[in-house]
Amino acid sequence: MAAGAFDRAANTAQGATAGSPAAGAYAQACAQLASAPRRWLVTGVAGFIGSHLLETLLHLGQEVRGLDNFMTGHRHNLELVRASVGEQAWRRFTFIEGDIRDPQACARACGAPVQAAGIGLGGSLAGCGRAGPDGSGAGVDYVLHQAALGSVSRSLEDPLLCHAVNVSGFLNMLAAARDAGVRRFVYAASSATYGDHPALPKVEQHIGAPLSPYALSKYVNELYAQVYARCYAMQTVGLRYFNVFGPRQDPLGAYAAVIPRWIAAMLDNQAVHIHGDGATSRDFCFVHNAVQANILAATGTDPAAVNQVYNVAVNARTSLTQLHATMQQMLLAVHPQHVQQAPHYGEFRAGDVRHSQADIAKAARLLGYVPTHNLAQGLRHTIAWYVAQAGRT
């Protein structure tokens, strides 16, 4: 692999904490992967976090298989990855259009696809491999399971769909990974699991009652992972994401996350809507931190680090009012035409928690994780990206 490609992939191991043990741990993991490529499956590969995982892994010279049904993912995310990594790296990507609610699709994804470059694929996927029907050849080493319905409000509106995707789909993937002999199964857990537990910061072993079907579904994922580890000697790692944000996060639709939704509104000189009085706080985590956590969780060699769950965040709490003010100022710096407007405040949203902040000591100790981007650094990168995408520079 070219040195430039490795530099791009390992770039987030520098960031705000250059020289720290965690920066060294991530850089070392990237270097080891670049020298000894592995086979990976990323579910939800066309989504926000999944596409960033794909991009980093391809830059590191890995063989990557991706599964997505485009329910919430987008083909243009894959187009952006292709443009970033180049055609040679893109040929190491095999795409499977399928649904994790289908056990056969999960088995096929964890098994071994037949390369058939470009057959039946248009747009961004032409030129990558496509999985064949027979499952011949070698399977994947690691699964990074990101596919899910990730919205509290959507789970309240359709709890049956939430269960089908987040619980049954998760179990399908877990069983397929077991049957394929996957080395390690890393999955996206959620800070929603903490439910109504009031303590701050959130520590992995202390959780409360779930406040939504989504929160319950993600906790059930953790329980199934524990059972599969005990009963089938699988290696699993759960990553409890705390409000991950960054480029490629969808700003549109009823279930859009707060940061991309607000950026889109601000670019259109519209007032943003805040649920509640603005004092609600979150531990916002830039997507590069989540990518780092996935790679460390998959490749770590400490036996004590396996079959665990970890918080993935920054260990910093920001209120929505503070977030709004910061975003206004940052947007003005790169888009002077922006007209500042006061936010509109409304009812607190059902199923949400009031405050969230992660204790990340466990991930630092066992995985070597320390976030390379704080909120301000991540916001600058994210806002600049959305402004460029909108042609507002």
Image (cartoon, rainbow, N blue to C red):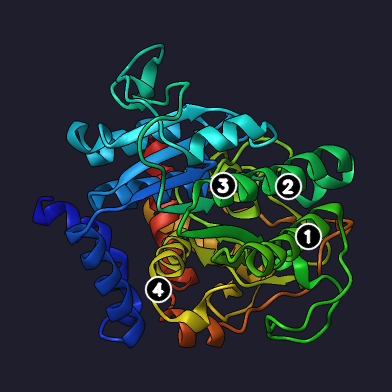
Q: Secondary structure at mark 2?
A: helix
Q: Is residue 47 left or right of residue 391?
A: right
Amino acid at the residue labelled 1: Val
CA distance for labels 2 and 3: 20 Å
Assess disc 3: are there few (<14), some (14-19) or many (≥20) residues with their C-alpha within 10 Å of its C-alpha: few
CA distance for labels 3 and 1: 21 Å
Q: Secondary structure at mark 1?
A: helix
Image height check: is 379 above or below 59?
below
Q: Which mark is residue 166?
A: 2
Q: Nearer the viewer, mark 3 or mark 4?
A: 3
Circles 2, 3 touching at the beta carbon (< 8 Å): no
Image height check: is 72 above or below 190?
above
Amino acid at the residue labelled 4: Gly
Q: Which mark is residue 311?
A: none
Q: Camera-side residue: 106 or 381?
A: 106
Circles 2, 1 touching at the beta carbon (< 8 Å): yes
CA distance for labels 4 and 1: 24 Å
Q: Camera-side residue: 271 or 108?
A: 108
The residue sitting at the top extreme is 120
Sequence-wise, which precedes: disc 4 or disc 1? 1
CA distance for labels 2 and 1: 9 Å
Q: Which residue is mark 3?
A: 179
CA distance for labels 3 and 4: 22 Å
Q: Nearer the viewer, mark 2 or mark 3?
A: 3
Which residue occupies 27% across, 65% down?
30
For the C terminus, the image quarter is top left
Sequence-wise, which precedes: disc 4 or disc 2? 2
Q: Which residue is mark 4?
A: 300
Q: Is residue 34 left or right of residue 265?
A: left
